[in-house]
C-alpha cells in the first residue's frame, strides 16, 4: 500500500512538472508560428530619457506598422496629413531578429537614418490577445543616443 501511494505521488508530481510552462520555450499559435509573427500597428510610444517622459500617440498625425516574419522584421512610418513639400515624414527600416523566451532582439540592417544601421536593440515583450508591448533601452553610442522605450502595438494580421 505504501509503495502504491509513493508511485501515485510520483506520477502526480511528474504530471504537475509537465504542466509548468518552460520560460525558454516560445509560445506558438495553432499554426506552429511564434505569436510575435504578424503585422502590428503602433498605437503609442513612450520614451523616458534623463528623467523626462514623452508619450506619442501614433493614431492621429502619423502611422507605423511593424511586420515580423519567421526571420526578419521591417517597419514603415509616415505622417497621415502629408504637406505638399519636402517636409513629408517617411521612416523605414528592418533587419533580422532573435528570440529567447520573452526577449526580442532586433539587428538593424537597414534604416532611413543610416548611422543607426548595425546596432542591436534588446527588448522584452509581452503579448496579451492582440496587443504587443515591447520595452527596452535603445542606444546608439556613436550618436550619444540612449533612452528607455516602451511601444504598444495592435495586431493587424498573423
Image (cartoon, rainbow, N blue to C red):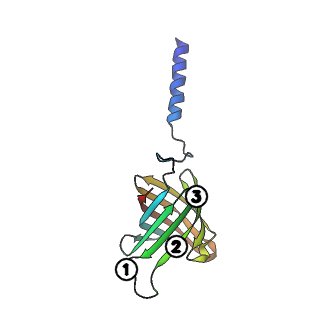
In the image, residue 114 lies at what x, y percent? 60, 76
The residue positioned 56% from the left and 14% from the top of the image is: 3
Toward which corner of the image does residue 131 lie, by quadrant?
bottom left
Residue sitting farthest toward the bottom: 85
Number of the label disc, if any, that sits on residue 81: 1
Q: Which residue is mark 2?
A: 92
Kindly check if marks 3 and 1 are in contact, taking CB atoms under 8 A apart as contact: no
**Cα gap from disc 2 to disc 1, whole angstroms:** 18 Å
Lower sequence index among marks 3 and 1? 3
Looking at the rendered structure, the secondary structure element under dot 3 is loop
Looking at the rendered structure, the secondary structure element under dot 1 is loop
As displayed, is residue 154 above or below residue 19? below
Residue sitting farthest toward the front: 31
On the picture, is 63 further left or further right than 8?
left
Toward which corner of the image does residue 142 lie, by quadrant?
bottom right
The residue positioned 52% from the left and 57% from the top of the image is: 124
**Cα gap from disc 2 to disc 3, whole angstroms:** 18 Å
Q: Which residue is mark 3?
A: 71
Quadrant the C terminus occupies:
bottom left
Q: Residues within 10 Å of mark 3 (few under 14, many from 20)?
A: few
Lower sequence index among marks 2 and 3? 3
Amino acid at each position: 500500500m505504501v509503495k502504491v501511494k509513493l508511485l501515485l505521488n510520483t506520477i502526480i508530481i511528474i504530471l504537475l512538472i509537465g504542466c509548468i510552462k518552460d520560460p525558454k520555450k516560445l509560445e506558438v499559435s495553432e499554426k506552429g508560428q511564434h505569436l510575435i509573427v504578424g503585422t502590428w500597428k503602433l498605437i503609442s510610444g513612450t520614451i523616458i530619457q534623463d528623467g523626462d517622459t514623452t508619450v506619442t500617440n501614433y493614431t492621429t498625425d502619423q502611422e507605423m506598422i511593424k511586420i515580423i516574419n519567421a526571420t526578419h522584421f521591417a517597419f514603415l512610418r509616415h505622417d497621415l496629413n502629408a504637406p505638399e513639400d519636402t517636409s513629408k515624414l517617411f521612416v523605414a527600416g528592418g533587419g533580422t531578429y532573435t528570440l529567447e523566451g520573452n526577449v526580442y532582439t532586433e539587428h538593424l540592417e537597414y534604416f532611413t537614418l543610416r548611422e543607426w544601421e548595425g546596432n542591436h536593440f534588446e527588448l522584452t515583450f509581452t503579448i496579451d490577445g492582440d496587443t504587443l508591448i515591447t520595452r527596452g533601452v535603445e542606444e546608439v553610442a556613436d550618436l550619444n543616443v540612449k533612452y528607455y522605450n516602451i511601444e504598444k502595438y495592435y495586431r493587424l494580421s498573423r
